[in-house]
Image (cartoon, rainbow, N blue to C red):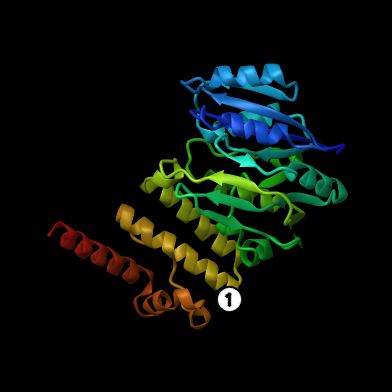
Amino acid sequence: MSRTMTSIIIPVYRTAATLMRCVESIAAQQDARFEMILVDDGSPDGCPAMCDSLAAADSRIRVIHKPNGGLSSARNAGIEASRGDLLMFVDSDDHIAPGTLSALSRLAEEHPEYDIIEFPICREMPSGRQEMTAFGCREYRDMDEYWLSCRAYMHAYACNKIYRRALFDGIRYPENMIFEDIHTLPLLMERAGVIATTDKGTYHYRWNSAGISNNAGGEAWRTLLATHIMMLRKTRRRSDEWTGYYMHVLNIQIYTSELTGDRPTLPTVRQGLCRVDRRWRLKALLLYVLGVRGLCRANRMLRTIAGRRQKD
């Protein structure tokens, strides 16, 4: 049995159909000390009563009832109430695989220098298809290396990680913001001494096409873009990995410009484009010739033409 306690924070809102599976997947974890904090975020359905019933049946479960404030607000309430040395966030429509918590707790105990441990995540699509993001067992003391070599910007989720509670002293998830995870992880990285990845355990993420992130508006995309541009400037590595990250941010810029009509804010970078991955080469060539502003303008023109043809 692990000696270190993990506080598992579960925001709950309109998830009566999946809450039981989520809680049961955690309650069944063996050889691990933990508490579950169910944060009822003013859910208008049967979730509040379900939370109370679950807590009455299992002393490891506590419930917080609060007015609706959104995902970040619920997570923050859970952080404030947490008693563990480690924190973990699980969305109430997701679940974790057997043995996940014991493996992570053991790793955290064996390596007290690990401030964040990231573990595999399986995205479960409505079609039944599964997309796995797996990791090898590695340690990162250079946060630029973690962000670029591990491509952490592609999986900057709150949920497939376990954190030292002390990292969150003075840091909370921004409320009333979509893509809050990508904003918060860099702040935690600035404090982390070591981030480790492991092949142990699995977080099962249920893809929801009607979810908040999948229906984000222009302001949310502006904020996401600004965060990534900030990280591009912070990393400042003119390497192939940095260029790959730049091309990822370029896609965000193109979509943001299309959605909002804003002038691009991503600077044009041409250095290193000749070495980009094959899937980026056409876009890299257009970027080299047109620059970011011209590429965004060309994309909007093509979208307009395609839309007119569909109407015809």
Q: Position of residue 245 (x, y in %)?
A: 54, 66
Residue 46: % across, % down: 50, 20
Q: Amino acid at mark 1?
A: Asp
Q: Residues within 10 Å of mark 1 (few under 14, many from 20)?
A: some
Q: Quadrant of the N terminus?
A: top right
* Relative to 57, residue 227 above or below: below
Across and down, in percent, residue 211 comes to: 44, 41
Furthest residue toward left: 312
Residue plotted at (48% across, 28% down): 14
Q: Residue at left 65%, top 40%?
A: 171
Residues 255 and 260: in front is 255
Query: Can you give x and y, in whole percent of width and height, for residue 266 in the image?
Result: 43, 64
Q: Which residue is mark 1?
A: 240
Question: Tag 1, which secondary structure?
Answer: helix
Q: For residue 306, say whether it is visible.
A: yes
For the point 65% across and 30% down, the residue is: 78
- Residue situated in front as seen by the camera: 150 or 291: 150
Vertical relation: 268 (above or below) 8? below
Asked if one can make out residue 238 in the rendered structure from this viewpoint, the answer is no
From the viewer's side, name the closer residue of 53 and 230.
Answer: 53
Write down the quadrant of residue 81 in the picture. top right
Name the one closer to the observer, 211 or 223: 211
Q: Quadrant of the C terminus?
A: bottom left
Residue at position x 68%, y 60% in the image: 135
